Image (tube, rainbow, N blue to C red):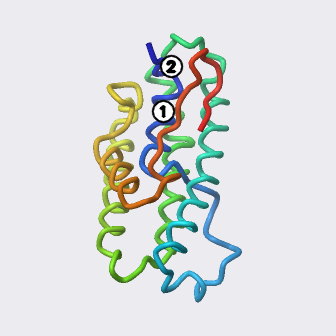
Amino acid sequence: MRPLLAAAALTLLAAIWGCGSGGGNKTTPAAVLQGLGRADFVDRADQICVQGRKRLILAGNRAFGSLAPDQKPSDAAVTDFAKEQAILILTQQYQRLRQLDPPASDRKRIERILDLADQGIEQLRSDPTLLNRGSGVPPALQRARQRAFVYGLGACGQPIQRSAGGGSLRP
């Protein structure tokens, strides 16, 4: 049986894009981010996702890593995690992803993915205990993750899983 523990909390976070990083993009000039081709857009988005994935794994392991493999975190602990860390990381993630200028032909598709993710963040904000139920991913975030993966955003579409023996989370 796959424990829901931190995997539930972090599957949500990584599920849609698996990412989120600190504040805005400080190293890439805005002019460079405009008019990206599809391959460049995917590469940059996935870089953001990998950075965020690391942040989410670290945060999840700090919050839930000491729980036994079959132990589920309390709704109160999940709520605190969502409010204090997950929602902030996700919000920052979408700010960074929205800075990227996708290819013109993909703009509407990417905007829909990002809009779904925003809806998922709002679902999480309204009910943080979604992390402890079902797949652990708010429905809109799940749809955003699936669409990101289909689009070709590999790092952005993969969930985070807990190792079979329990313990810490891994990508």
User: Image check: 44 left or right of 101?
Assistant: right
Residue 73 is labelled as 2
Helix, strand or loop under label 1: helix
Q: Is residue 118 visible?
A: no
Q: Nearer the viewer, residue 22 or 110?
A: 110
> Looking at the image, how many numbered discs can be counted on the residues?
2
Q: Is residue 65 visible?
A: yes
Q: Which residue: 48% across, 16% down?
A: 72
User: Image check: 134 left or right of 87?
Assistant: left
Q: Position of residue 44 (x, y in %)?
A: 57, 68
Q: Which residue: 33% across, 55% down?
A: 147
Looking at the image, is 150 positioned above or below residue 62? below
Residue 9 is labelled as 1
Q: Position of residue 153 (x, y in %)?
A: 46, 58
Instruction: Tell me the kind of residue under disc 1.
Output: Ala
Circles 1 and 2, Cβ within 8 Å, touching? The answer is yes
Q: Which residue: 59% across, 38% down?
A: 171
Looking at the image, is 155 positioned above or below residue 103? above
Instruction: Rate crowding at label 2 as few (under 14), some (14 to 19) or many (20 or more) other CA atoms within 10 Å.
Output: many
Residue 137: name its quadrant. Answer: top left
